[in-house]
Structures are given as C-alpha cells and as structure tokens.
Amino acid sequence: MSQNQISGARIKLPSGKDAGLVDILSFCYGLSETDVQVLMGLMRGNARGTEELEKELKLSKASINRSLNKLLEMNLVMRIKEPGNKAGRPRYLYRAKDYSELKSKMLNDIKDCSEKMGQLVGQEFKPLEIRA
C-alpha cells in the first residue's frame, strides 16, 4: 500500500474467503468503508476541514463528521484548531497521524487483535470437564 491509496490487495482466509485492508480495519477497529475512505483522504496532503473533505471525497457532511469522530476516538487522526479564526465558532482541521506512526499503530493493534482471538479460542476450546 502506498501512502496515498489502498491497492486493493487481498489475502485468502482459511474459510476460502478473501479479505482486504477495509475488511481487516473494519474487524479490528469497527471502521466502515467510509471511515477508511476518510482516513485515506486525510493521508493525502495537508490538514483539511470538513468542507474540503466533502468536496474531495463526495460524501455528506454528516458522513464525514461521523467518520472523523470515530477516527479521532481510535487515535488514527488529529484535530487541529485553525489558527487565526477568532470570531464565532472555532474551525477545526483534520489530518492523519504521521504515516510511519499510523502504520506502526495499525500493525501493533492488528497483532494484539490476533493474539486476543487466539487466547479466546484457547479458552473456549478446553475439554468440558476442565471448564470452571
């Protein structure tokens, strides 16, 4: 994957189904395809406001705001108060975390997710008489 786009690469799962980055991020973070689209949009270029993202991604303001809130909560993007905007409501700009920091975070989180799934399988597949 480049810093700007999702390549569309897929992996084959044991079930025979295939999965891509959107599927993996959806499972581990609960991100939707729109959330991933917003994240990837923020990885291109400088910090931007919701209006710029609406135009660039051709999504509604409500969709953008929902995705931004989820991405902020997951610590995948940053919100920056726009400098020089003194009158009225503050305007915020958004940008993705640094590319290498974001990649490292995702790799660590996915590894953690996988380990927790393994622990759950180990816990649930004990012989019946051993379960307490």
Image (spheres, rainbow, N blue to C red):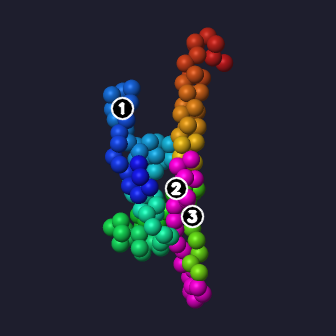
Distance from the alpha carbon under mark 1 to that under mark 2: 26 Å
Distance from the alpha carbon under mark 1 to that under mark 3: 33 Å
Look at the image and tell me whether residue 38 can be seen. Answer: no
In the picture of the structure, the residue carrying the numbered disc 1 is 12
Q: Is residue 90 magenta?
A: yes
Residue at 38% over, 42% down: 20
Secondary structure of the residue carrying tag 2 is: helix
Q: Quadrant of residue 54?
A: bottom left
Q: Quadrant of residue 85?
A: bottom right
In the drawing, does residue 33 fall left or right of residue 94?
Answer: left
Q: As displayed, is residue 50 above or below residue 24?
A: below
Q: Quadrant of the C terminus?
A: top right
**For the residues carrying marks 3 and 2, which lies nearer the camera in this image?**
2
In the drawing, does residue 126 fall left or right of residue 55?
Answer: right
In primary-sequence order, the first of circles 1 and 2 is 1
Q: Is residue 102 magenta?
A: yes
Q: Which residues are magenta?
A: 84-104
Q: As displayed, is residue 122 above or below residue 107?
A: above
Name the mark on residue 78: 3
In the picture of the structure, the residue carrying the numbered disc 2 is 99
Residue 88 in picture, x, y percent from top left: 56, 86
Tell me which amino acid carries mark 2.
Tyr
In primary-sequence order, the first of circles 3 and 2 is 3
* Label 2 Cα neighbours within 10 Å, binned few <14 / some 14-19 / many ≥20: few
Tell me which amino acid carries mark 1.
Lys
Residue 70 in picture, x, y percent from top left: 51, 57
